[in-house]
Image: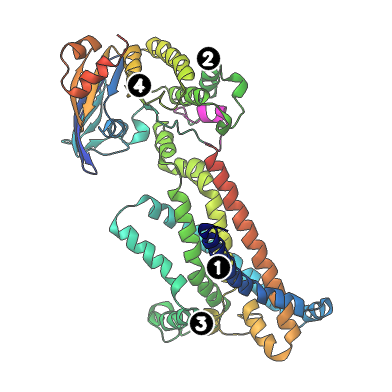
């Protein structure tokens, strides 16, 4: 279970947010500039909040009162950023193998298994710059999973894809995340994603999580005009 | 022709004329030098006794100064690219200073600081010996004038590295040193190579600071540009031959630097 309460500011935006992700996916939605990506970066340790507490199961990742601040490389959080951030000078297989085991060996067996499982086998030795959007998505996910993370953070994983690819990848991702049973936070602005992925949805606006609950709860009692508009534009 | 078409035609003519005049002016001396030197002059000039000692010395000193500039400049550039504070910005300006100081001024400054009666003379030279007028002084002068070119290019190159890649690499368990070697350096390398090339070309051509701080002793401190200056007074053909060699080298370095930068830019865009 990933649990976080953080405060901080980025530019003029004041972040003051709490979230909880049990096994299963928490979908984080909100308008542009709400601070969703910043919150993910704070969870990862890439941005330091001014104050807060982040725990992953029994492990404390951040506790500003006791001075605990685990560095990024030790937090064991998988990250799929918005532009995938594949390493352009490495092949698909080298990207997925980048994580090292505790002995410092590349996780070759695990990487190979993931590459095959995601149907990327024929592309294993290609440069990542030659891939389509959907393929890049899968490589980014496989790369994060090869490190055997204890939670997964995905930032707008489908935003850069065209409509047809988005449907295919959404369905693939949905099945895979359900099978994984890893606490996950998925940031999106697309109501279709919220419907597909999330039993629980957190709404972030102006740096704060203003509402969290199931789709039905949000629709029954929307906490803001944005929430109201968001749930009404979804299919259900 | 309509009024608008006439204005456009005039504007085009002004552009071509103004730009053309400048470009031709920049090209003319190079063309003039090549045209004024016959192959026979070139070969006999190359056999002048000044030439080979100067060539060997320049090669030695510019190689050593390049290694120092790249070795010390790369971590500096990385730190400057990743820092956002006022101190970092101030350091960036300080590092660029030697590029805008006149070379002769740099020579005087180096002399007053590191010379026999300079600021640090008591600490550096308890025996009374000093670094001035030695080959080491040539290297120091070259480092001083050429470092800004490398550090600025390297800082820009590290800045252009996608920070998402850096964050992802760290989430995959890589410590910052491994991220530097395996992610940041490979992604910045084209900018670093281009910067090193320009820096090397600058140190190869250094004249004023070298003359004042290191002197003009053949084989010890007389680099190629100084040799050209000396040859100019005794045998113009030697000066011409050396000049052609330097122009050819400079041209080659420029083309190589541009090609490297272009290839790096294409690799980034392909993402």
Regarding residue B268, the answer to whether it shows in the image is yes
Which is closer to the viewer, label 4 or label 1?
Answer: 1
Disc assigned to residue B213: 3
Q: Residues within 10 Å of mark 4 (few under 14, many from 20)?
A: some
Numbered badge on residue A150:
4
Asked if the stretch drawn in magenta spans residue A201, the answer is: no
Cα distance in 3D space between marks 1 and 3 = 46 Å
The residue carrying mark 2 is A117
Check chain identity for marks 3 and 2: say if they share one: no
Give me the chain letter of mark 2.
A
Q: Residue furthest bottom?
A: B234
The alpha-carbon separation of the residues under discs 2 and 1 comes to: 64 Å
The percent coordinates of residue A97 (x first, y second) are: 52, 28
Q: Secondary structure at mark 3?
A: helix
Q: Quadrant of the N terminus of chain B?
A: bottom right
Callout 3: few (<14), some (14-19), or many (20+) C-alpha neighbours within 10 Å?
many
- Whether tag 3 and tag 2 are in contact, CB under 8 A, the answer is no
Per the image, the residue denoted by label 1 is: B14
Against A35, residue A186 (above or below) is: above
Which residue sits at x=66%, y=75%?
A: B28
Q: Chain of mark 3?
A: B
The verdict on a common chain for dots 1 and 3 is: yes
From the viewer's side, name the closer residue of A120 and A111. Answer: A120
Q: Are marks 4 and 2 in contact (CB under 8 Å)?
A: no
Mark number for residue B100? Answer: none
> Circle 1 sits in a helix, a strand or a loop, which is it?
helix
For the magenta stretch, what is the residue range? Answer: A88-103
Looking at the image, tell me whether mark 1 or mark 3 is earlier in sequence order: 1
Q: Chain of mark 1?
A: B
The mark closer to the camera, 4 or 2, is 2
Observer able to see residue A97? no
Q: Chain of mark 4?
A: A
């Amino acid at each position: 279970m990933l649990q976080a309460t953080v405060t901080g500011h980025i530019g003029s935006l004041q972040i003051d947010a709490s979230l909880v992700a049990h096994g299963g996916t928490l979908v984080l939605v909100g308008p542009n500039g709400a601070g969703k990506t910043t919150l993910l970066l704070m969870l990862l340790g890439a941005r330091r909040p001014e104050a807060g507490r982040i725990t992953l199961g029994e492990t404390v990742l951040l506790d500003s009162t006791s001075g605990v601040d685990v560095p990024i490389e030790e937090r064991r959080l998988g990250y799929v950023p918005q532009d995938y951030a594949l390493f352009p000078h490495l092949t698909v297989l080298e990207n997925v193998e980048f994580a090292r085991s505790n002995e410092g060996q590349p996780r070759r067996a695990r990487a190979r298994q993931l590459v095959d499982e995601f149907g990327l086998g024929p592309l294993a030795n290609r440069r990542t710059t030659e891939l389509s959007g959907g393929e890049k998505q899968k490589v980014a996910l496989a790369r994060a999973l090869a490190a055997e993370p204890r939670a997964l953070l995905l930032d707008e994983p489908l935003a850069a894809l065209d409509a047809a690819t988005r449907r295919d990848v959404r369905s693939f991702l949905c099945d895979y995340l359900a099978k994984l049973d890893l606490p996950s936070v998925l940031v999106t602005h697309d109501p279709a994603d919220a419907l597909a992925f999330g039993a629980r949805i957190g709404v972030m606006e102006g740096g704060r999580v203003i509402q969290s609950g199931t789709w039905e709860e949000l629709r029954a009692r929307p906490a803001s005009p944005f929430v109201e508009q968001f749930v009404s534009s979804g299919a259900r | 022709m309509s009024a608008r078409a006439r204005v456009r035609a005039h504007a085009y003519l002004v552009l071509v004329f103004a730009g053309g005049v400048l470009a031709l002016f920049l090209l003319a001396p190079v063309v003039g030098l090549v045209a004024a030197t016959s192959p026979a002059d070139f070969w006999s000039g190359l056999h002048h006794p000044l030439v080979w000692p100067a060539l060997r010395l320049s090669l030695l000193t510019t190689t050593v100064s390049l290694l120092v500039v790249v070795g010390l400049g790369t971590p500096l550039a990385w730190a400057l690219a990743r820092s956002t504070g006022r101190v970092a910005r101030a350091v960036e300006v300080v590092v660029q200073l030697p590029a805008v100081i006149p070379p002769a001024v740099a020579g005087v400054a180096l002399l007053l600081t590191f010379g026999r009666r300079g600021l640090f003379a008591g600490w550096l030279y308890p025996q009374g010996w000093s670094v001035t007028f030695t080959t080491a002084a040539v290297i120091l002068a070259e480092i001083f004038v050429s470092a800004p070119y490398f550090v600025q290019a390297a800082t820009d190159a590290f800045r252009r590295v996608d920070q998402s890649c850096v964050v992802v690499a760290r989430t995959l368990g890589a410590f910052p040193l491994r991220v530097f070697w395996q992610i940041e350096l490979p992604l910045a390398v084209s900018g670093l190579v281009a910067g090193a090339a320009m820096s090397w070309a600058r140190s190869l051509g250094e004249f004023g600071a070298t003359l004042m701080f290191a002197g003009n002793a053949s084989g010890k401190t007389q680099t190629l540009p100084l040799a050209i200056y000396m040859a100019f007074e005794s045998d113009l053909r030697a000066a011409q031959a050396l000049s052609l060699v330097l122009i050819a080298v400079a041209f080659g370095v420029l083309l190589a630097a541009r090609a490297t930068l272009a290839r790096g830019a294409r690799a980034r865009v392909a993402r």
